[in-house]
Amino acid sequence: MKNYTILLATAAIAIGLNATAQIQKGNILIGGNLANVNLGLNGSKIISAEITPKIAWFIQDNIALGGYIDLGIETAKNSGTTTNYGIGALGRYYAGKEQEVIKHSRFFGEATIGLGGVNVSDADNTNGLNISAGPGFAYFITPNIGLEVLLKYNALVGLGSAPYQGNLNASFGFQIYLPGKSAARKVQNDIQ
């Protein structure tokens, strides 16, 4: 019976939240971004992709802090392979109120800092401090699931044959916003 109550409470939370409830204090963001996807089937046979899983906790309304992992690879026929990696902390700030032009959407800013590297098998390498920042836009397809686009400038400063590397990166993301313990308790109390 207890498991049934928890399942019912979770369903009620998922249905009952409005478009701003997902970015309240105590909630959790879990998801990731996908960038630089290229499955070249003709000519140079380039294959590349970068995935960035993320998790963050809302320390107050509209502000989340957490961590990320970044993994990427690019390879081409008759060419070297480029790998990139990173791990560190991230922060997000969701601006203003729900957008009037597109309902159930919010603009946000994201910044990261951590350790990372870009290693090219036959060229320059950089490993060291990885910093990025940029704006994003989230559209909530349900109260707890958001699709997003993010444009960030990434800088990598450190050791290696190239002491600095930077790029502008566009990525697409999928985030799940889970209610924190206090929201779950409130719904459970309302059910009883």
Image: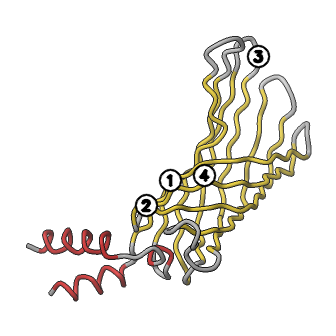
**33 to the left or right of 124:** left
Q: Which residue is mark 2?
A: 145
Q: Residue at x 64, y 42 (%)?
A: 35
Residue 77 in percent (x, y) is at 70, 13
Quadrant housing residue 151: bottom right
Q: Which residue is mark 1?
A: 174
Q: CA distance from mark 1 to mark 4?
A: 15 Å
Colour scheme of this structure image? secondary structure
- The residue lying toward the viewer, choosing from 56 and 139, is 139
Name which residue type carries label 2: Ile
Q: Residue at x 56, y 62 (%)?
A: 138
- Please determine whether, in this image, residue 2 is positioned above or below residue 29: below
**44 to the left or right of 189:** right
Q: Which residue is mark 3?
A: 79
Residues at circles 3 and 2 in contact by the CB criterion of under 8 Å: no
- Looking at the image, tell me whether mark 1 or mark 2 is earlier in sequence order: 2
Q: CA distance from mark 3 to mark 2?
A: 39 Å
Q: Secondary structure at mark 3?
A: loop
